Amino acid sequence: MRIFALVDCNNFYVSCERLFRPEIKHRPVVVLSNNDGCVISRSQEAKDIGVPMGAPAYKYQSFFLQNNVEIFSSNYALYGDLSQRVTATLASLTPDLEVYSIDESFLEFPPCMLRELPSIGKEIRTRILKWTGIPVSVGFGSTKTLAKVASRFAKKYPQTEGTFSLCGRNDLDRLLDKVPVTDVWGIGRRHGKRLIARGVSTARTFKDLPNLWLKKNMSVTGLHTALELRGTPCFELDNSPKPKKTISSSRSFGRPVTALSDLEESVAAYVARAGEKLREQQSLTNGVMVYLTTNRFNNLPQYSNSATRMLPIATDYTPELINTGLQCIRSIYKEGFSYKKTGVVLLDLCGKYNRQCNLLELDHKAESAKKEAIMNLLDSANTRFGRRTLSYASEGLEQPWQMNRKYKSPSYTTSWDDLPKIG
């Protein structure tokens, strides 16, 4: 039998905010989506008073005020940094690690450690809390899907003390009967509705469906999910994720934008961020796509469009990418419209060090080395001193088009200016 573990950060965004605001530890807390739109993370206290996930913030303003709810805008720099710290802590426990999302990671342990799982779960929770301040739940299972189910029990039932194992249990069917089929990892909303209509409402009834029916109606992925619930591993740890085929960067504006200059600034800023991601995974791009759109939820004239420019030589050099992005936005911009969003997509990515070179590159070796040195310097400075320590003039300084983040907390761990002060 194999042993998988899922480590899930509890109410992760809220936990990150509470880490530097201990006085709100027992108050209801919510974190809002981009432009302070909807609730995307809630403390247990917020759940207890009836704040639903996805609640529109503008509809709940008076409710938040009456119930002394602490509100935060999304602070992705803080969340991303703390997520990396949690991952680094997990890596100190086992080399078999897959970072599944910003707040979840899978681990694998040898079968000989089966009897030690309670102490392992406690050690994981204790070390992460001590080293990062983030509370987590730990679920163990003989497959990744069962580990997901176990983590759900660890979160839901206080008597588990944050750790629960489904490994080697004789009452697995009884426990799976408590799990709604729509909560099973890998079963989406569409399949969930179809299954419930067929009378399949729990994880147990789902796993008992015939293999032929599963493969016919839910493809091989549905069959693999059922097999995993039966204890047969079908999904391996992905501890060396493949590089992305495309990289995108976009945000909705905090206010309607009409001027081309503002749109150009946003495109330059998004290209700069996408360029950072490109270099992080040691890739080059062969093309840039830029799109823009108006707000389809208002009654104003509507317009959306996109433009793509392919590059003669694959590159990760941000100034060249910005220049290409600006050409794209200028070619599709139209006056008289109120724009809601622009976005950038880097296309046709290839590995920087394992690819077939373009013959045109042979004449530009010295120039390429100079560009690489400049990018290394810029990335090093922004990593060490905080994002946008060095930035491009085309990104603008004030950036009035930026999304609304009225309740944003300081970037405590990624900005020198925001370091907590004592005294």
Image (spheres, helix red, strand yellow):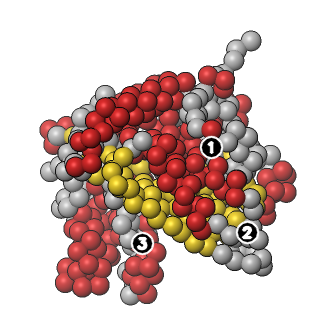
Which quadrant of the view contains residue 254? bottom right
Task: Identify residue type, mark 2.
Answer: Glu
> Circle 2 sits on which residue?
335
> Circle 3 sits on which residue?
188
Mark 1 or mark 3, earlier in chain: 3
Mark 2 or mark 3, earlier in chain: 3
Q: Nearer the viewer, mark 2 or mark 1?
A: 2
Is 59 above or below relative to 351?
A: below
Which of 214 and 175 lies nearest the eye of the viewer?
214
Q: Position of residue 87 (x, y in %)?
A: 39, 36
Residue drawn where x is 39% and y is 44% of the image: 316
Q: Position of residue 297 (x, y in %)?
A: 71, 75
Number of numbered discs visible in the structure rendering: 3
Which of 73 and 417 lies nearest the eye of the viewer?
417
Task: Identify residue type, mark 3.
Answer: Gly
Q: Residue furthest front?
A: 363
Q: Position of residue 65 (x, y in %)?
A: 84, 50
Left/right placement of residue 15 relative to residue 310 reads right
Q: How many residues crowd mark 3 within 10 Å: few (<14), some (14–19), many (20+)?
A: few
Left/right placement of residue 66 relative to residue 22 reads right
Which quadrant of the view contains residue 388? top right
Q: Secondary structure at mark 3?
A: loop
Q: Quadrant of the C terminus?
A: top right
Q: Nearer the viewer, mark 1 or mark 3?
A: 1
